[in-house]
Image: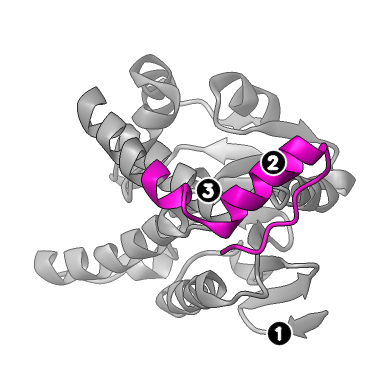
Amino acid sequence: MTEQQSDLRMTVEDGALLVALNRPEKRNALDESVQAELLGVLQDAADDPEVRGVVLTGTGEAFSAGGDLSRFERDWNPAEFRAQSHELTRLISAVERMEKPVVAAINGFTTGAGTQLALSCDLRIASENARFLFREGMIGFIPSHGGCARLVKLVGLARARDIVLGGEDLDASEAFRHGLVTRVVPHDNLLDEARERLRRIFRRAPQAYGLAKRLLHLSASVDLESGLFAESLAQSLLVGTEDHKEGVRAARERRAPSFTGR
């Protein structure tokens, strides 16, 4: 096991990288430094064969308060603001594009870009203490970085309207009812449940998982014929992999497969 102290707290064990946003005094807000560091960690994890999956969580009472409010306490040139905003969008999108499993362990409240970071993860395990706060309108903003577009794709237009326009905070059970989270667990069990979800995913062939993840994301944005064509291309790549051959052998021999990622 390895550990590093910074604005991120990280440990690696049995192929699972735990990344905790570690600014509890700032409610794990995402300033430019944290964004750059987290993006680098995710890029390194994507390329590291020792890392098979990621659990993303927060320290203290918050998962993430989103963008640091100090960022807005200045006069912005619109073009400069868009450039800075694109960097945060890039971080959130990197989670979706990473062809390894990323599980959010939502330990407390989350809002703004913190919510988008959680929603971009493959699975979202919520503590019973978790809350989703859609309060962008209270500072004259809208949910961005996918806050509208991603939410509609995830839960549908009607529920997205209820969430964004309804003006109510969602506790863990309401978030589950709306489809924002995969499961709600007791707070003390949160990280154990997130790691267990990763262990279940690790039973699957890594290339197949990565392509399925990308195809699901693609399918939310393209027509049926385009989706079918993309699936056919992916399957034609997977049919020649060693993991596919091992999976077929294991199924015939009625044993668990031993995948290598090749």
Per the rendered image, the range of residues in magenta is 235-262
**Residue highlighted by disc 1:** 5
Classed neighbour count for the residue bearing mark 1: other residues with Cα under 10 Å, few (<14), some (14–19), many (≥20): few
Residue 102 visible:
no
**Residue highlighted by disc 3:** 208
The residue drawn where x is 61% and y is 74% is: 49
Question: Which of pointers 1 and 2 lies earlier in the amino acid sequence?
Answer: 1
What residue type is disc 2 on? Ile
Instruction: Find numbered disc 3 in the image and state the secondary structure of the residue it sits on.
Output: helix
Residue 257 point in image, percent of width and height:
75, 49
What residue type is disc 1 on? Gln
The CA distance from mark 1 to mark 2 is 24 Å
Residue 62 point in image, percent of width and height:
66, 54
Residue 168 visible:
yes
Residue 43 vs residue 244, the one in the foreground: 244
**Residue highlighted by disc 2:** 125
Question: Which of pointers 1 and 3 lies earlier in the amino acid sequence?
Answer: 1
The CA distance from mark 2 to mark 3 is 23 Å
Image: 3 above or below 218: below
What residue type is disc 3 on? Ala
Quadrant of residue 260 in the image? bottom right
Which disc is residue 180 wearing? none
